[in-house]
Structures are given as C-alpha cells and as structure tokens.
Image: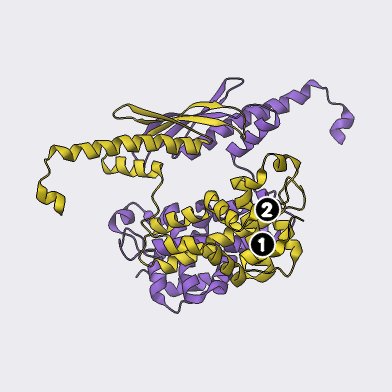
Chain colours: A yellow, B purple
Amino acid sequence: MQPDTARLCRALSYTFLDQGLLEQALTHRSANRKYNNERLEFLGDAQLGQVISRYLFVTFDSASEGQLTRMRASLVKGQTLAAVALEINLGDYLLLGGGELKSGGFRRESILADAFEAVLGAILIDGGEQACADVILSCFASRLATITPVSVKKDAKTQLQELLQGRQRPLPLYEVVSIAGLAPKQSFELRCTLTDTEQSFVAGGTSRRKAEQAAASLALKMLDDDTTVAPATQPQTKDDRNE
Amino acid sequence: MQPDTARLCRALSYTFLDQGLLEQALTHRSANRKYNNERLEFLGDAQLGQVISRYLFVTFDSASEGQLTRMRASLVKGQTLAAVALEINLGDYLLLGGGELKSGGFRRESILADAFEAVLGAILIDGGEQACADVILSCFASRLATITPVSVKKDAKTQLQELLQGRQRPLPLYEVVSIAGLAPKQSFELRCTLTDTEQSFVAGGTSRRKAEQAAASLALKMLDDDTTVAPATQPQTKDDRNE
C-alpha cells in the first residue's frame, strides 16, 4: 500500500470499516489484472450520477431537463472527476503497474477519474448510500455552490446544430480528413462543412469527438462573427448604447 | 387524463399518494410545454441506472467491468425501456399534443422510453428510493432473470475495433457518404474502410451511429467469413471433427 491512507480518509471525511475495499479501489488494472478497481468504478459511476442528479433536480426546481442534463454532464465528466481527485491527492495513493508508473499514470486524467469513482463505489459498499452521498456532496461542494443552469454552455456541435436549425439551414457534415498513429495514441483531423454555403472548417484532436468539437467551434466562431457584423449596418444611436 | 390510471398502478404494483406526479409523468411536452415529464425523466433515468447497476454488481460477482457495462447498456437503452413500457401499456395513458397524437406518438420508442423513466422519477419523489427500486426490479424481472455476462454482445464497431487490434491491423476509417433529408428525419450513408487492405463497406441508417454500426457489421461479417475459410486449408481429420 502507498502512503498512509488515513490522510486520504480525512480528505474524504470517511473512515472505512473494511480497509481492503479502499485498497481495491486504489488498485489500477496495471498493478493487478484480477484484483483491481474496475468493478467498483462501474458501481461508483452509477451512484455518482444518481446523487448529482437528485441534488440538481431538487436545487434547480425551475431548470429545464436540458439544463439539468448539461449541468450533470459538466460535473461527472472525466476532466471534473480528475480535478476532484487531485484536490484530495488521490494520485499519491494509487497502486499502478510498472508501465503506468513510469509513464506518470498517477497524473493521467482517466486513471484519476476512474479511481475516484471506484472509491465512491467502495464507500457505497462499506458504509451505505447515505455515507456515499455525503462524501459526494462534500467533494463537489465548491462546484455545486457555483454551478447554475446558465453557467454550463452547450457543446460546440450542439450549439452549431441549433444555430443552423434556427436559421432553417441544413445540418453540418463531419468527415474524417486523416487519422495518424495507432490506437490508443491516434490523432484525428476532421472537416466540418456547411453544405449550403460549401464553407469548410478543419481541426484536429486526440479523438474523433474532440476534433469534431474543435471543427464545430471554428464554424460557430465564423457564424458568430457574421452576426456581430450584421447588426452594425443599422447605425447605433447614443440612446441605444445607454440602454 | 386518459383511461383509468388505477390499472396502470396495478401493472406497476405501486399506488401514488400524489396523483399529480403520475399525471405529470404521463404528460409529453407536445401536450404541455411547461408542465410535462421532461424533468422527471432526467431524475428517473439516473435512478434506473443506479438500481440496475447495483443489481448487476451484486448478482454477477465475477463479471468484468466491461460485461457489467454492456449488460447495463442493454437493459437501459431506449429500445428496452420502450418494450417494458409496452408491457404495462404505458402508451394508453400518455397525454400527447395534437401533432404527436396524429402521427401515433404513443407508439414511438423514444416517447414511451422517456415516459417510463419519468414514471420512475415520479415514484422516487412520491414513495422514496426503496419503492422506486422495487418497481424497477419488478418491471425488469424477466429480463434480469435471463441476462448473463455473455448473453450481451459487444456492438459491431467495438467488435470490429477489437478484432483488428488483435490482429495488429490499423483501426477502420468511417466516413459519411451522404446525408438525405432534413433533421430530425435524416438518413445517413456511411463507409467503413479497412485502410490496410483498402476494403470498403457502405451501409445506411436513420442516424450516423446506426449507419456506422451497420457498416461495421458488414466488415465484421467479411472478416468472420475469412476466418471460417482460412482453417479449412488444413484438412480436417475425422478425429478433429469428433472432438
């Protein structure tokens, strides 16, 4: 086992009855193919989704389903979970195999996020639902205190789709331009085409999804600039500016 | 309100304290833009995921995380939820607006699936977690009794990717060949290319995802046929056949 897990338990405000469960939650597959945190991650992931969903549903009683969904997605995405994991120094306690250890796996976003979910799964088994919900709400307290239905933007692809639909224009076409390297270290180049105007935007990313979002952002930026320019043809008066 | 909801409550084995919640869960957005089942669906969706996840985790104690994830996905996907909704005749009780009513919305998979999740969300608020879990496990009883870690296959894209990776071949390339119609009634044609052999497979579907899966299936089928043919070059003996 890595350094004193008592410190981790203090950071979580939770003490395990069964230390073995915590140990399993901290064990990455690279350290032990049989006895690792993957199943606990499956369990923790679902519990996290439920607790965050209930919190948002109760707290934002006039938010739309779309707003609730976007708030939940921004809270439970890998990037956020990894940030929460870093706040409790989870990386210091991970058991990783040789390869992952050398390549700095304890800093990798997906490994941190998965381990955090596994710790939640372990707490659920060890202490029950209420204990697990308490830990989740405490770990996310600062984020839950600042999130609002309008603070979470739609992703670029969705924004672009809605903007085009709103203007009765056809949906954009996404095409793979190139894929370099071999999985899991590939890089993608995607083209987003506005088929009616034949304008194209090419962008890259480490996954097809990321490259698509980047290409959609470029298209959005162009369309936004268009909109900014358009109203300027109506000269602004002093009164307008002061309103 | 549509026909006697007492019959629906019997099918669910649950009686609502607050009939208003059930009514809201049965109200589609097309019938009421403000007071409808969308928020309840958000809540029910997360609760369903958690209950099914816990059941699978406990029941299949030696299933891998991948197997658990695939079993969960097969149980909570729209198609399954719509089938469960049909079993309790949920379509008979839905409140739909004029357009959806005329076009037979009460039979539409997504509307049925969403309403079923909304009913679960309503039960969670009305009767609490245990009542909601009981209804979920009862509605899914026949499916939970027959599902096994090996009964749920990976989707075609994943199967194809794993097969190619196992043979040290590059990942397939997916490209949009054409998009016909306007959202939300578009049809897509996708090409899946095995870049090393330059073999291509084109298939269509009502979403990009479905067309990709269909194209991947074609590629898989060809690769499977290859494998079936390959060992036949080693003549089979009578003994081999009897083993």
Give the mark, 1 or 2, whose residue is nearer the N terminus: 1
Label annotation for residue A92: 2
In the picture, the disc for residue A150 is none
> As rendered, which of B69 and A68 lies closer to the eye?
A68
Q: Which residue is mark 1?
A: A8
- In the picture, the quarter occupied by the C terminus of chain A is bottom left
Tags 1 and 2 both on a single chain: yes
Q: Position of residue A108 (x, y in %)?
A: 62, 45
Q: Chain of mark 1?
A: A
Q: CA distance from mark 1 to mark 2?
A: 9 Å
Say which quarter of the image contains residue B56: bottom right
Q: Is residue B167 above or below residue A146?
A: above
Please state the horizontal and vertical placement of residue B141, each as a whole percent of the image. Answer: 62, 64
Residue located 32% across and 58% down the image: B30
Using the image as rendered, state which of residue B153 and residue B237 is in the foreground: B153
Q: Answer yes or no: is residue A21 visible.
A: yes
Q: Is residue A14 above or below residue A157?
A: below
| Residue that appears at 71% across and 40% down | A102
Amino acid type assigned to the residue bearing label 1 in the image = Leu
How would you rate the neighbour count of disc 1 (Cα within 10 Å): few for under 14, some for 14-19, many for 20 or more? some
Give the percent coordinates (x, y) of residue A39. Answer: 68, 55
